[in-house]
C-alpha cells in the first residue's frame, strides 16, 4: 500500500487520472485494498471503481459508507451513474437502495430514466448531459452560456453543440470549432444558412440496437452521436469512450463464445459458476469425441493390419481442425464487423474453400512424401495425401458455412461453431483416411 500512499501524497488531485489509481490498486494484495480505497479522493472514487475489474467492486462497497458511495455517484456522468448503481445492486441490493434514496432528485430521475431501456438499446448507453441551443439564439449568447456552464463544471467533454427547434427536436449538430468562425451577432440559423453547409446530424434513436450505433461510429469515424427518441426530440448523446468499451466487450464475448466459455461467468470470478458453464460445452465436446471414436472403431481391423495408420491419424485430424478454425475465426470476425453482406456469402465460401484446397494440396504432397518414405509404403503416402485434401476442403467449406448459416438463423455465429466444426473435421478426417486406407492398402 505504500505505493498508493506515495502516489497520492506526491501528486495534486487535479493531476490524477482514475485509470492510474486503478492500476496501482490492482497490484495490491486483497488484504490491503480496503485501506487503499479509503485513500482515493472521494471525487474520483466512482471513476476509479468503474475502471477496476468487476470483482473489486466488493472492496469498494466494504470500504466506503453509504454517504461516500452516494457522493461517488453524484460525481459521475449519467451513463456512469447507471453503471455504478447496477454494479452496486449486484454486490448489495440493500446498500444500493440506501444510496439511491439519498441521491438528489435530478440524479434519481436520470438513473431511473436510463433504467427503462433494455441492455441492447442505445438509450441504455447514452449520457443525458448535452449542450443544446435553439436555432434562433444569438451565437454570442450561446457562447456566454457555454462558458458559464463550463466554469461551473456542469459540462464535460463537450465537442459539439446540438441545435434544436422550439420543440426540442434535433435539427443540426455543429462542432465548437465551427461556432468560432460564425458571426457572433447573428442567430445560429442565420449563420448556418450563410455558411452553405447542411450540418445535418448523424443521429441514433434511443431504441436502436446498440450494434447499429457502434457500426455508425466506426463507419463515419464519429466522436459523439446525438440520440433522439421516436419523435426526433433530443434525449442524450453517446460518446466514443463508451463505444470503445462496447467494442471491447463484444470482442471479448466473441472470443469466449468461440472457446465455449461464458463471458459473464468468467468475469464474476465465481469458480463453481464458471466451471459449470465450461462443463456444459465440455460435455457436448465429449459426445462429439465419442462419435469420432466410433468412426475409428469401425476401422479397427484396418488399423490392426497397418499400424502406421494409428500413428498418422492425428496429423490428418489436427491439420483439418486448424484449417477449419482459421476459416471460422476469419468469417466470424468479419461478420461481427459487418464486412460480409448477405449477397457476398457465396464469395466468402468460395474464397475459404480455395485457400483450404491450395494449402491442402501443398501439405498433402509434403506429408505424402514423408509418410511414404517414413514407412517405406508409397501408397500410404497417397492415402494420407488424398485424405488431407478431402479434410482441408471440408474444413474450409464448413468453417465458412457454419457461421453464415447461424447468421441466417439469427444466432450469434460464434456460439457453438468451434465445437460443431471440430466434430466435422475429426469425423471426416478419420473416415476419409481409414476408408481410403481400407480401399487402397488392403
Image (cartoon, grey):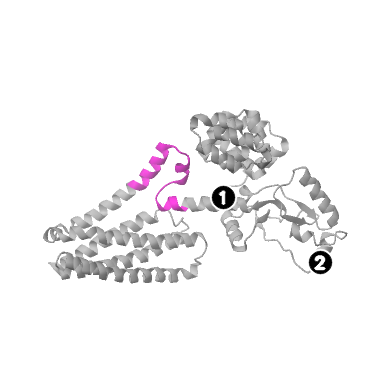
Taking the image as shown, residue 9 lies to the left or right of residue 271, namely right
Q: Which residues are magenta?
A: 254-282
Q: In the rendered image, which residue does mark 1 sit on?
A: 245
Locate residue 301: give its quadrant. Answer: bottom left
Give neighbour class at mark 2: few <14, some 14-19, many 20+ (Cα, 10 Å): few
Residue drawn at (22%, 57%), measured in percent from left and top? 295
Q: Nearer the viewer, residue 49 or 263?
A: 49
Q: Indicate the position of residue 230 as horizontal and vertical percent values.
A: 68, 55
Q: Residue at x 20, y 63 (%)?
A: 434
Give percent across and percent down for residue 47: 62, 40
Residue 213 in sight in this render = yes
The residue mark sitting in front, 2 or 1, is 1
The part of the image, by quadrant, that contains residue 417 is bottom left
- Is residue 265 left or right of 145 when viewed as pictured? left
Q: Contact, CB < 8 Å: mark 2 with mark 1?
A: no
Q: Is residue 153 above or below residue 62?
A: below
Secondary structure beneath dot 1 equals helix
Quarter of image, res 315: bottom left
Question: Does the segment drawn in magenta span residue 14?
Answer: no
Residue where numbered disc 2 is placed: 193
Quadrant in which the C terminus is drawn = bottom left
Q: Nearer the viewer, residue 165 or 177?
A: 177
Q: CA distance from mark 2 to mark 1?
A: 38 Å
In the figure, is residue 288 to the left or right of 105? left
Residue 363 point in image, percent of width and height: 29, 68
User: In the rendered image, is residue 386 in sight?
Assistant: no
At x 76% / y 46%, what residue is drawn?
150
First in residue order: circle 2 vs circle 1: 2
Q: Which of the labelled discs sits on residue 374, or is there none?
A: none
Image vertical order of residue 379 relative to residue 236, above or below: below
User: Could you say whether the residue bearing mark 2 is in a helix, strand or loop?
Assistant: helix
Q: Position of residue 257 (x, y in %)?
A: 43, 51
Amino acid at each position: 500500500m505504500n505505493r498508493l500512499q506515495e502516489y497520492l501524497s506526491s501528486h495534486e488531485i487535479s493531476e490524477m487520472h482514475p485509470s492510474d489509481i486503478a492500476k496501482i490498486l490492482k497490484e495490491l494484495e486483497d488484504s490491503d485494498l480496503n485501506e487503499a480505497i479509503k485513500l482515493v479522493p472521494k471525487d474520483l472514487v466512482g471513476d476509479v471503481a468503474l475502471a477496476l475489474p468487476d470483482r473489486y467492486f466488493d472492496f469498494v462497497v466494504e470500504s466506503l459508507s453509504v454517504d461516500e458511495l452516494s457522493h461517488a455517484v453524484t460525481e459521475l456522468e449519467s451513463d456512469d451513474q447507471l453503471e455504478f448503481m447496477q454494479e452496486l445492486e449486484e454486490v448489495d441490493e440493500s446498500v444500493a437502495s440506501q444510496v439511491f434514496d439519498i441521491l438528489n432528485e435530478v440524479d434519481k430521475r436520470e438513473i431511473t430514466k436510463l433504467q427503462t431501456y433494455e441492455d441492447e438499446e442505445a438509450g441504455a448507453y447514452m449520457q443525458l448531459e448535452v449542450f443544446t441551443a435553439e436555432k434562433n439564439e444569438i451565437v454570442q449568447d450561446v457562447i456566454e452560456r457555454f462558458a458559464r456552464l463550463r466554469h461551473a463544471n456542469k459540462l464535460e467533454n463537450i465537442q459539439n453543440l446540438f441545435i434544436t427547434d422550439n420543440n426540442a427536436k434535433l435539427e443540426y449538430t455543429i462542432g465548437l470549432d465551427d461556432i468560432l468562425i460564425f458571426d457572433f451577432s447573428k442567430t445560429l440559423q442565420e449563420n448556418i444558412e450563410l455558411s452553405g453547409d447542411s450540418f445535418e446530424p448523424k443521429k441514433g434513436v434511443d431504441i436502436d440496437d446498440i450494434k447499429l450505433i457502434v457500426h455508425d461510429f466506426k463507419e463515419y469515424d464519429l466522436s459523439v452521436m446525438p440520440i433522439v427518441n421516436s419523435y426526433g426530440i433530443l434525449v442524450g448523446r453517446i460518446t466514443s469512450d463508451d463505444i470503445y468499451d462496447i467494442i471491447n466487450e463484444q470482442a471479448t464475448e466473441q472470443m469466449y463464445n468461440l472457446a465455449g466459455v461464458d463471458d459473464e461467468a468468467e468475469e464474476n470470478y465465481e469458480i463453481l459458476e464458471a466451471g459449470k458453464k465450461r462443463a456444459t460445452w465440455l460435455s457436448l465436446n465429449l459426445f462429439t469425441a465419442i462419435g469420432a471414436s466410433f468412426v475409428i472403431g469401425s476401422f479397427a481391423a484396418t488399423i490392426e493390419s497397418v499400424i502406421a495408420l494409428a500413428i498418422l491419424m492425428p496429423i490428418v485430424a489436427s491439420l483439418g481442425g486448424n484449417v477449419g478454425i482459421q476459416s471460422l475465426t476469419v468469417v466470424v470476425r468479419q461478420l461481427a464487423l459487418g464486412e460480409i453482406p448477405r449477397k457476398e456469402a457465396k464469395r466468402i465460401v468460395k474464397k475459404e474453400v480455395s485457400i483450404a484446397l491450395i494449402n491442402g494440396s501443398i501439405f498433402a504432397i509434403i506429408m505424402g512424401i514423408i509418410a511414404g518414405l517414413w514407412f517405406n509404403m508409397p501408397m500410404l503416402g497417397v492415402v494420407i495425401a488424398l485424405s488431407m485434401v478431402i479434410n482441408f476442403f471440408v474444413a474450409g467449406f464448413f468453417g465458412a458455412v457454419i457461421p453464415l448459416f447461424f447468421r441466417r438463423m439469427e444466432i450469434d455465429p460464434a456460439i457453438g461453431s468451434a465445437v460443431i466444426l471440430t466434430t466435422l473435421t475429426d469425423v471426416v478426417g478419420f473416415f476419409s483416411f481409414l476408408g481410403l486406407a481400407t480401399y487402397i492398402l488392403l
